[in-house]
Amino acid sequence: MDAVAAYCADEPVDLLINNAGVSHYMPLADLPASRAREVVNVKVLAPTLLMNAAVGGMQERGKGAIINIAGMIAFSGPAGPEVMPRRAVYAGTLAHLVAMSQTLGAELQGTGVTVHAVCPGIVATNFHAVQGIDASAIPRMSAEDFVTGTLRGLELGEVVIAPGVEDRTLLDNVFQADLAAFAGQSPTLATRYRTS
């Protein structure tokens, strides 16, 4: 991480794609600490350090793009166990990439630097196979469609690019609900939490 971050800080990097992946899909209670550390290092710490190293130079040059490959699992937090297997750490790291991309993108408005989180479903690569997971029965997007959708999302200026989501308003509704909840906070204890 340090060597790549040093490169990003010293060289005129105009495009940074954070696409390292590791899954370790399992419930938190079953996840060895070493694997939890690895997921967080790969999906949270490394992208954060690389963005931190590259963004200053991009701002100085007035141009650049950062693309963080996350995934639709970032939105799976409310899902019950009947919908998908538990993988809290993995889902949390993808949610971090989405929130980080949105927040950093807002920080960089007007600088010529854009930030994007790409959220595919399952893509037809060897990502699962090399980890001993058989995903062959699950419908998967082709790698070509994934790349095409990502590039088109960049052209459209989408901060969160979801190549497999036909109805864009679904994502917009999620983000509006996030902002409504954020704006709905108060220093006064909510009624439902008051004891009688």
Image (spheres, helix red, strand yellow):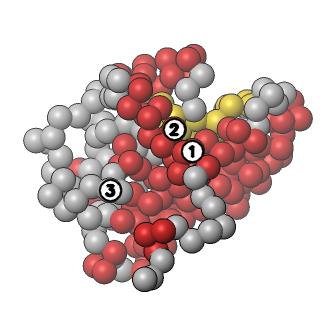
Q: Amino acid under label 3?
A: Pro
In the image, residue 65 above or below residue 144: below
Q: Secondary structure at mark 1?
A: helix
Number of marks in picture: 3
C-beta proximity under 8 Å, tags 3 and 1: no
- The amino acid marked with disc number 2 is Gln
Name the outermost residue toward the left: 137
Mark 1 surroundings within 10 Å by alpha-carbon count, few (fewer than 14), some (14 through 19), many (20 or more) = few
- Quadrant of the frame with the N terminus: bottom right
Which quadrant holds the C terminus?
bottom left
Whether 114 is drawn above or below 41: the answer is above
Seen from the viewer's position, the closer of residues 26 and 166 is 166
Residue 24 can be seen in this image: yes
Give how far across and how far down residue 190 sits, in percent: 52, 67
User: Which secondary structure, mark 3?
Assistant: loop
- Residue lying at 48% horizontally and 68% vertically, measured from the top left: 191
| Image location of residue 2, percent across then percent down | 70, 61
Check if mark 2's residue and mark 1's residue have beta carbons within 8 Å. yes
| Mark 2 or mark 3, earlier in chain | 3
Callouts 2 and 3 close, C-beta under 8 Å: no
Please give the residue where the numbered disc 1 appears in the rendered image.
Answer: 179
Label 1 amino acid?
Leu
Q: Earlier in the sequence, mark 3 or mark 1?
A: 3
- Looking at the image, the residue that sits furthest to the right is 60
Q: CA distance from mark 3 to mark 1?
A: 17 Å
Tag 3 residue: 78
CA separation, marks 2 and 1? 5 Å
Residue at coordinates 47% horizontally, 53% vertically from top-left?
A: 95
Specify few, some or many for label 3: CA neighbours under 10 Å numbering under 14, 14-19, or 20 or more.
Answer: few
Which of the two residues, 123 or 187, is positioned nearer the viewer here?
187
Instruction: Identify the element where label 2 is drawn.
Output: helix
Residue 176, which numbered label? 2
